[in-house]
Amino acid sequence: MWEYASEAAPDAVGTIGRWSVRVRRSGPRGDVFTLVLADKRMGAAPVPDAVLAAAEIAVAAVLGSMRGADVRQVRANSQLLETLERGIPAARQHRYWARLADFGFVPGTGFLVLVEEPLEDAPRGEHALVDALDEAAAAGLPLLVANRIIAAASDAELHALLPDTAAARHWLGARGTRLAGGVSSPHGSLADVPQAVREAEHAHRIAVRRSRAARSRGAAPAHLVAYDGLRFGAWLAGRASDAETRTRIRRLMSPFDEHDDLLETLIVYLAESLSVIGTAGRLFLHPNTVRYRLRKTEELLDGALDDPFLLADLVLVLGPDVAAARAAHDERH
């Protein structure tokens, strides 16, 4: 019966053995469902339009009611997260733990905050919220999730709060293959949610930079960055996002404007842990050519590449590109 329905036209009439069958594809607000009505009475006429219409209305009403319940649940979920992100007094957190328990959280359990941004081909908006909740439910994981938060840097951002458990970290690891996201360090007090959000946003900014650098090199663009796993240089670079910082970065890198080959050699040289031989192998160059380019780079920068302070500046600025160069090489080998 269902094999026939899957191949039939949207409004089909036919027979299957002794069954008289009517197929209708329809649904509220563009959500398609397939309705199959069959009659086995000898010589029965096709299922009348009135019966089909009544069945269609009944199914649409049930689906509409379920959708309304889902929408209300998503809104309540999002509103609770938004309230926690705005901040609550520590003395009142027991009230909010009770509300979190309604969504499956165990009161007093440590939690993480996730800030993520989908890649180009991933769902966005309400679809992203529903997908995240469905995936978490399938993993048996409680989750608060919201988007279009006033404090967010863009409408594409999705914020989530989840327990700090092994199952949650496994879920994050699987999810991290499809997005650019940042995860906070673990926290225990709901009064710390605003701080956890700041940490996750910090890690998210670094993930976005790494994602862009990886995409430019043909590497996998998905990155999930944990705040408590950041190296000091990456952590410091992530905090510097104002106009003055961009001006200083521009001042350091402007000598390379007309020297793409030197910049690429420098990035690979850093990715190869300052190995001339490794850089030559990656770029298919003679080692002497690499040495020549590095000397020209030192002239442009007016400094030596064995100067730890100059290297520190370069790693802070080029860190995402260096990480992407390493990742692209690892993916090919």
Image (spheres, rainbow, N blue to C red):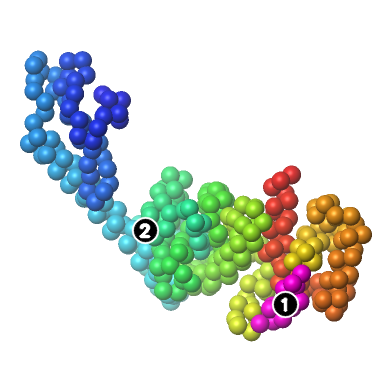
Q: CA distance from mark 1 to mark 2?
A: 42 Å
Kind of residue sitting beneath label 1: Ser
Which type of secondary structure does the marked residue at label 1 adopt? helix
Which element carries disc 2, helix, strand or loop?
Answer: helix
* Circle 2 residues within 10 Å: few <14, some 14–19, many ≥20: some
Could you tell me which residue is drawn at 70 percent across and 60 percent down?
Answer: 323
Q: Position of residue 139 (x, y in %)?
A: 46, 45
Coordinates of residue 225 in the picture (x, y in percent): 61, 60
Residue at 38% across, 55% down: 127
Provide the major secondary structure of the magenta segment: helix
Question: Relative to the observer, which residue lies in front, 304 or 88?
Answer: 304
Return the residue at label 2.
Answer: 126
> Which quadrant would residue 234 be assigned to in this image?
bottom right
Q: Earlier in the sequence, mark 1 or mark 2?
A: 2
In-image side of 19 versus 138 (left or right): left
Residue at the spot of label 1: 254
Q: Which residues are magenta?
A: 247-259
Res. 254 image quadrant = bottom right
